[in-house]
Amino acid sequence: MKIVKAIASFIILMLIGIFISYGDTDNNGYYKFLETFNNTQADFKFYNIKANGLINYDITKNEIKDICIDILTDLGLEESDIKWEEKWNEKEKQIYIQSNTGNRGISIIGTKKNNDESYIIVDILDNKVYKNIVGIYTILEKSLYKYSNVVDISTCISGEFYKKSQFNKYDDILEKILYNMNAEEIDRIENENMISITAYSKLLDKNYLEYLGNKINLNIGIRYSEDEDKTLIYIATPIIKLDY
């Protein structure tokens, strides 16, 4: 009996170790993503997370409200922190929630297209702290997967250099990012003041899109802003979903 218990205990510990390792592996790519941004030595400007979850059943207005409140609660907010707007008629069925607390803004949209297609769309913008981004991403992902089997999340960090960099310096920055993220460049767009590349990183292999027959999960943009007299950098996975 003691031998059986010992074997059972060993198996349980082994399984726990596997689950822990699996969880760590899932997050390693995002921690490396943060480290890579930090290594650019750009001053942090903001981070943005855009997420949406598909709901493929006939959902009611109150159910959408409950989902929105649940997500807000998971993100550490209370109903008193938010503003509600809703349009619910034959032409449009949408609930809009907005919260601005300090330097972080969160908006959630619940929209019903038809009886078989509704979406929960979350947009988070923070211009103060970026090192909590992995935790926010994980909370948001778990929240959406409670209600949806199809979840899409894009994450972008932006920084700035207080000068106009020489154009050939852009390539140096891009090469370091690709190296740190164990990534291969797939496509590039460039003009006089801007370079944007899409790439595939082995560290982010579970989060990718198909593009021109290739997998992509890393998007880097560098451009000079004449209005601000700054060089701006954007690092996103899988793609940048901002006008830049």
Image (spheres, rainbow, N blue to C red):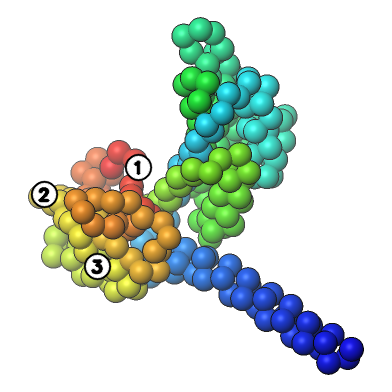
* Quadrant of the rendered image containing residue 74: top right
Q: Which mark is residue 191?
A: 2
Query: Could you tell which of marks 3 and 2 lies nearer the N-terminus?
Result: 3
| In the displayed structure image, the side of residue 99 where residue 233 appears, left or right | left
User: Crowding near pointer 1: few (<14 within 10 Å), some, many (20+)?
Assistant: some
Is residue 162 visible from the viewing direction of this image?
no
* Quadrant of the rendered image containing residue 98: top right
Q: Which element is circle 2 on?
A: loop
Query: Could you tell which of marks 3 and 1 lies nearer the N-terminus?
Result: 3
Q: Disc 1, disc 2: CB below 8 Å?
A: no
* Quadrant of the rendered image containing residue 69: top right
Q: Disc 3, disc 1: CB below 8 Å?
A: no
Q: Disc 3, disc 2: CB below 8 Å?
A: no
The quarter of the image holding the C terminus is top left
Closer mark to the observer between disc 3 and disc 1: 3
Q: Which residue is mark 3?
A: 184
